[in-house]
Image: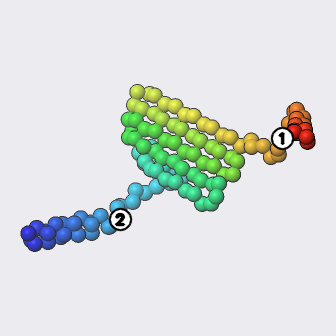
Amino acid sequence: MDSKILCLFCLTFVVGLALAFPQVPVPAPKSGGYAPDHYFQYINVPKHKVFEWGYKRGNKDHFREEYLSQKDHTFKAKLKWGDSYDGHGEMYYDYNHAPKYQEESKYPAPKPAYKPAGRR
């Protein structure tokens, strides 16, 4: 029984040690962007009301790429997809027109209705 536990421990230790070493990094293209065969997923939240999130998944025959970002009242989204059957699409959404003031009501507020003083 003890030899089985010792073998299991050694196997777990060797696998854990092998996984602890970093993988060989893929060099980034010189254009500063991602090559068509580079797939990724990330999120960045540097401070309150500011975030970036995105991913690119799939393979050269079928892929999907999505990106979202928000900074205060500005929101941007991008979605791209493609496949080996010449299917391709892109959608963009940009919202940056938040109201800077509170609009006044078009109708006056109703006067409060009070109960007569003599009744309960």
Q: Is residue 86 above or below residue 38?
A: above
Residue denoted by label 2 = 22
Residue 115: image quadrant is: top right
Residue 48: image quadrant is: bottom right
Would you say 49 lies left or right of 84 here? right
In the rendering, at what x and y percent does residue 96 appear?
Answer: 71, 43
Q: How is the image coloured?
A: rainbow
Residue denoted by label 1 = 120
Q: Disc 2 vs disc 1: which is toward the camera?
A: 1
Q: How many marks?
A: 2
Find numbered disc 2 in the image and state the secondary structure of the residue it sits on: loop
One can see residue 15 in this view: yes
* Tag 2 and tag 1, C-beta contact below 8 Å: no
At 8% across and 69% down in the image, what residue appears?
1
In the rendering, at what x and y percent does residue 29 appear?
Answer: 47, 53
Q: Amino acid at mark 2?
A: Pro
Few, some or many residues within 10 Å of mark 2 (<14, 14–19, 20+)? few
Nearest the viewer among 43 and 1 is 1
Would you say 90 lies left or right of 94 here? left
In the rendering, at what x and y percent does residue 53 appear?
Answer: 54, 50
Nearest the viewer among 101 and 50 is 101
Would you say 72 lies left or right of 60 here? right
Would you say 45 lies left or right of 17 here? right
At 46% across and 50% down in the image, what residue appears?
41
Q: CA distance from mark 2 to mark 1?
A: 79 Å
One can see residue 31 in this view: no
Q: Amino acid at mark 1?
A: Arg
Mark 2 or 1, nearer chain start? 2
Q: Which mark is residue 106?
A: none
